[in-house]
Image (cartoon, grey):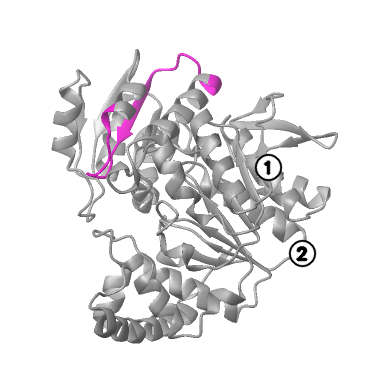
Amino acid sequence: MGDFKAYANSFQTVINLSLGRISALLDMSGNPQNGCRCVHVGGTNGKGSVCAFLEAMLMAAGLRVGKYTSPNLVRVNERIAVDGVPISDADLTPLLDEVGRRCVRVEEKLGEMPSQFEVWTAAAFEYFAAQRCDIVLLEVGMGGEFDATNVISSNAAAVLARIDLDHCAYLGNTVEEIARTKCGIIKSGCPVVTVEQFPGVNAVIAEKAAEKSCPLTVAKAPAPVGFEGMNEFIEYKGRRLRCGLGGPHQLENAALAIAAAEVLGLDAESICSGVENARHPARLEPLAPGLIFDGAHNPNGVAALEAALERYFPGEERTVIFACMGDKEVLPSLKMLDGPGRSFIFTEVAGNPRSMKAHALRELAASVGILGDEAPDLVTAVKMASEMGRPAVICGSLYLYETVESAVREWNKARF
């Protein structure tokens, strides 16, 4: 099944939203998803961070926790983890072999090969069932209603992080339209937890929760009570907690995770431990002195990044290293990143057919007056930035993280 493994591990280039293929695939293995108690986490920004907080909280409570997320940062194994440990190659290889055999049968039956994301979703459910997880954190890939993860028939809770414009070609052109799609993860009678966000979005969530007779909790981000480095402090149950994840936007994600944990019945001690011990690479992550990586790739994420930079490094000159996928509406994000004391290096994700080419990105930015240099890959871009002699932030695409280790070596080589 060598060719199938290459397919399963390649970049997703075709998005075909439906549940027919994943349903057929899982039916052939006895529907392992039906044995999983799932917390379904959707939204546009913050899904991964909310999952990280919840994972730490649930593990602190002594539960065996499965977590399914995407995309991976360095190794595909990261997508499927139990108690924070990615699936091993020894477990993954035979699992993909078996899923591959079933994919052939699905294609014969339906005339379509399951997508890469569907392959991984099926593998995840089988692994979590075999590992006897007490609870599974299930991060939506795209949208909600027709996302492969929505093959589950019930969930312990539906958690909706901040919703904004993204993947508009597939999900809708307004935040309300996108919210309706993302609310597809709400199942009859399940608790629904969200945050205060655009009024139209909250109205859609309330409407959909009421339609399914679901209790709705709307969490409110706590007021900041100080920070250390790039980590905020919050107060919960009379305790002052240092958020394990950096950035002022994590106050909202922590509040959402806390509300979800309370709905699930977790004790305060486990919740406090999870807030402080959560880890989530590539989100406002300090890679080296003066070098930060953040996965911000849409206006909402970039706004959060800008707020963090202004809070922790006010007025500091900085080089922005930026890459993005070709299907993104990138100009609003670039305009937010532009400003006094900012310079740009435009790059691309090497080997990813979806990535916008560096020269095309540079030309697009120049069309709105944002000028910069270009580099063929992240390592070259970081080397160029290090020679400029000022701090730098890498953002625009999580896929850039794959070559971060080599990039950091170049940064340190030039600056120390």
Q: Which residue lies under the disc numbered 2?
A: 62
State whether the magenta stretch is mostly helix, strand or loop. loop
Give the residues in magenta: 311-331
Q: Quadrant of residue 369?
A: top left
Amino acid on which the number 1 mark rests in the picture: Thr
Q: Is residue 402 left or right of residue 308?
A: left
Locate the C terminus and report the quarter of the image it occupies. Answer: top left
- At horizontal 33% and vertical 19% (from top left) the residue drawn is 342
Q: Nearer the viewer, mark 1 or mark 2?
A: 1
- At horizontal 41% and vertical 51% (from top left) the residue drawn is 143
Badge 1 marks a residue whose secondary structure is strand
In the picture, the disc for residue 412 is none
Mark 1 or mark 2: which comes first in sequence?
2
Q: CA distance from mark 1 to mark 2?
A: 25 Å
- At horizontal 20% and vertical 27% (from top left) the residue drawn is 365
Amino acid on which the number 2 mark rests in the picture: Gly
Crowding at mark 1 (Cα within 10 Å: few <14, some 14-19, many 20+): some
Q: Would you place residue 126 above or below residue 274 in this image?
A: below
Q: Would you place residue 156 above or below residue 45 in this image?
A: below
Residue 28 is situated, as x and y percent measured from the top left of the image, at 43, 86
